[in-house]
Image (spheres, rainbow, N blue to C red):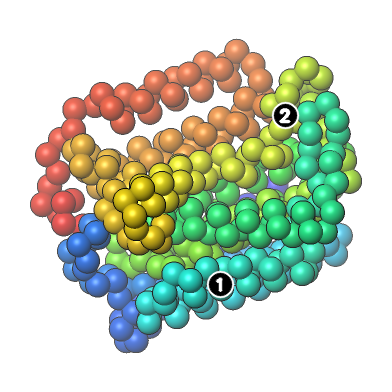
């Protein structure tokens, strides 16, 4: 655990330091977010936050190679992590080009599929799906490739869609990464496997990169992650989920739930957790596609009706809207982990209080009049 904490801190510190450099490069190259009707910021903000996050991830990976425990792990751990980061670099470059030249939607989609295909070609993909009461269902090569590409592309776009308020995407993905780290770590422990696994390594680094970026990006943001960042962190989170099934021949999550063989949630968790972590941005993505197609517009056409826009419309300030959406993301991500791995009356009580608090803050707390700075950011 200490080595994973080291990986987290290295990613955080390097990302934070590179954020200053990335901001300066963005300003000099003209990679700035112009003010558009659908945006909530009032002045141009530099992009390239994704470049800083990629640097933090790479630094964490290199340090992990030198740590006593992780450096002696199975070769597959660093194999999977390496190709996820290379795929992340590919999609980050695509995002940099988009931040500079505003690529069309189909070009970006093609680049996302290419990066996802790169992971599959290098064996970072789903190999099996856990079915309740039936063990693992092995996928053939075509099924595995198709499902893996769909998961990566959907996750990348879900994160991209939710990246609409200062600190929102970095916070949601950071929360998801920490929750998935806890799940992967406990999965390995419950099945008497080595605790050195690529999913935990990637999630520790990703959580650190998001934490290191937030001081630059939380309201009022001094730099945006841009598509280079949102697509990068989406791919790394999806890649960590893909790598998990390839490193366990069999899994038995009932051991992690107190030995209850009747519990279906631990068995289903390897399937639903990667989706549940990003349920907020995924819900936003699905609603946006339905909304736009019903209106006769392209699913990729931008608008100002995302969930975070609606939070501002009902009267929440910029900071409060972001914090509330973090609470929802944390409730879903950590709720799934806690309910399955640490089922107890105390866990149920904690989650119940969390639900009530989040609902009250979202719908009951009287919205205050946003300050001028909040409205314009």
- Residue 212 or residue 43, whichever sits in front: 43
Tell me: 194 left or right of 54.
Answer: right
Q: Return the mark for residue 266.
A: 2
Viewer can see residue 341: yes
Q: Return the mark for residue 94.
A: none
Q: Position of residue 89 (x, y in %)?
A: 59, 74
Q: Position of residue 280 (x, y in %)?
A: 45, 42
- Identify the image quadrant of the C terminus: bottom left
Q: Return the mark for residue 110.
A: 1
Q: Secondary structure at mark 1?
A: helix
Q: Residues within 10 Å of mark 2 (few under 14, many from 20)?
A: many
Is the C-beta separation of discs 1 and 2 under 8 Å? no
- Residue 316 or residue 21, whichever sits in front: 316
Q: Residues within 10 Å of mark 1 (few under 14, many from 20)?
A: few
Q: Nearer the viewer, mark 1 or mark 2?
A: 1
- Which residue lies at the image location 79% right of the left edge and 64% below the top edge? 123
Q: How many marks?
A: 2
- Which residue lies at the image location 51% right of the left edge and 21% below the top edge? 350
Tell me: 350 left or right of 262.
Answer: left
- Residue 160 or residue 342, whichever sits in front: 160
Quadrant in which residue 205 is drawn: bottom right
> Disc 1 versus disc 2: distance between alpha carbons?
36 Å
Q: Position of residue 195 (x, y in %)?
A: 79, 47
């Amino acid at each position: 655990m200490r080595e994973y904490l080291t990986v987290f801190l290295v990613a955080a510190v390097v990302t934070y330091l590179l954020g200053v450099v990335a901001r300066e490069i963005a300003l000099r190259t003209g990679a700035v977010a112009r003010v558009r009707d659908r945006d909530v910021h009032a002045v141009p903000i530099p992009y390239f936050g994704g470049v800083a996050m990629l640097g933090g991830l790479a630094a964490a990976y290199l340090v992990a190679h030198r740590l006593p425990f992780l450096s002696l792990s199975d070769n597959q751990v660093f194999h999977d992590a390496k190709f996820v980061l290379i795929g992340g670099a590919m999609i980050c470059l695509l995002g940099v080009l988009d931040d500079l030249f505003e690529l069309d939607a189909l070009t970006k989609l093609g680049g996302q599929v290419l990066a996802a295909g790169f992971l599959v070609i290098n064996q970072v993909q789903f190999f099996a799906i856990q079915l309740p009461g039936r063990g693992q269902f092995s996928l053939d090569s075509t099924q595995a490739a198709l499902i893996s590409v769909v998961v990566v592309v959907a996750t990348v776009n879900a994160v991209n869609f939710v990246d609409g308020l200062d600190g929102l995407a970095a916070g949601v993905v950071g929360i998801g990464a920490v929750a998935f780290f806890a799940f992967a770590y406990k999965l390995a422990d419950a099945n008497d496997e080595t605790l050195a696994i690529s999913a935990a390594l990637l999630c520790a680094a990703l959580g650190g990169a998001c934490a290191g970026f937030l001081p630059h990006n939380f309201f009022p943001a001094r730099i945006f992650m841009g598509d280079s960042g949102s697509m990068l962190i989406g791919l790394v989170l999806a890649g960590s989920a893909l790598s998990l099934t390839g490193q366990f021949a069999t899994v038995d999550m009932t051991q992690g739930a107190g030995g209850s063989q009747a519990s279906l949630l631990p068995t289903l968790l390897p399937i639903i957790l990667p989706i549940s972590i990003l349920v907020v941005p995924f819900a936003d993505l699905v609603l946006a596609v339905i909304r736009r197609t019903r209106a006769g517009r392209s699913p990729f056409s931008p608008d100002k009706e995302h969930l975070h826009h609606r939070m501002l419309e009902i009267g929440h300030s910029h900071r409060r809207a972001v914090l509330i959406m973090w609470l929802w993301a944390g409730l879903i991500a950590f709720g799934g982990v806690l309910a399955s791995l640490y089922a107890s009356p105390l866990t149920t009580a904690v989650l119940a209080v969390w639900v009530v608090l989040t609902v009250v803050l979202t719908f009951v707390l009287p919205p205050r009049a946003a300050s001028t700075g909040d409205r314009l950011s």
